[in-house]
Image (tube, helix red, strand yellow):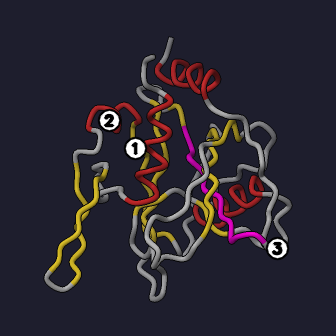
Amino acid sequence: MSDFERIRRRLDERLAPPHSLQIEAARIRQAAVTLLLRDDQRATELLIIKRAEREGDPWSGHLALPGGRAEPQDEDLLVTAARETYEEVGIDLFDEGRFIGQLPLLKPNNPRLPQIEITPLVALAPSQLSFRLSEEVDDVLWLPIGQLKREGLSAVYEMRFGNLVKKWPAYPSPLGPIWGITERILSDFLSLLDSE
């Protein structure tokens, strides 16, 4: 059995099916992100994007998953995730069956960040794909899941506030540390793959 087949079997057993995807704009701002998986023959990989540096963007330059805020024209959060993935990296996930499950909802822990509810969705990449990056994305990286599990939260992200330096746990990657909400999503996802 291949690495991808083992991971798919474990996800089929443990991953919650997509649910509660209705957009409730009157209740809270909502967003959806896509944890996109592909079978690279040697290993199962997931897509990480490096967000472009942009004035006024609280997540400027961060490593993240493709995704963004729900728009009024979106039918539900599945459409939000597919639309944002297509807009940001040019990968079409609108086909039936691409989304295989949902991780727990998250909100930013930092009260200075916009209050938003984030729905992480897990999807399978099309077998044939090519990237078309938007101006919101500087770079992309396929990161092996096995590497993430092996290395764990072995990196640190530091931010200076005057004389104070704050540190957050992070996953290492060739593009820099993966921290914050993306780290929390990856930790939730990787916990599904742990042995019982």
Q: Residue furthest left?
A: 163
The amino acid type found where label 1 is placed reads Leu
The span shown in magenta is 27-37
Compare residues 183 and 98 and report the one nearer the observer: 183
Left or right of 181: which side holds 147? Answer: left
Task: Note whether 9 is above or below 140 in the view shown.
Answer: above
For marks 3 and 1 on the same chain, the one whose residue lies earlier in the sequence? 3
Q: Residue 22 location, x and y as percent?
A: 82, 56
Task: Note whether 164 is above or below 116 in the view shown.
Answer: below
Circle 1 crowding by C-alpha within 10 Å: few under 14, some 14–19, many from 20:
some
Q: Residue 193 location, x and y as percent?
A: 47, 27
The amino acid type found where label 2 is placed reads Gln
Compare residues 161 and 66 and report the one nearer the observer: 161
Label 2: which secondary element: helix
Residue highlighted by disc 2: 147
Q: Which mark, by number, is residue 121?
A: none
Q: Separation of disc 3 and disc 1 at Cα?
A: 33 Å
Figure quadrant of residue 42:
top left
Instruction: State yes or no: discs 2 and 1 in contact (Cβ < 8 Å).
Output: yes
Q: Quadrant of the C terminus?
A: top left
- 66 inside magenta stretch: no
Q: Residue 194 location, x and y as percent?
A: 43, 24
Q: Residue 116 location, x and y as percent?
A: 61, 69
The residue positioned 50% from the left and 38% from the top of the image is 189
Figure quadrant of residue 156:
bottom left
- The dominant secondary structure in magenta is strand
Residue highlighted by disc 1: 143
- 36 inside magenta stretch: yes
Circle 3 crowding by C-alpha within 10 Å: few under 14, some 14–19, many from 20:
few
Residue highlighted by disc 3: 72
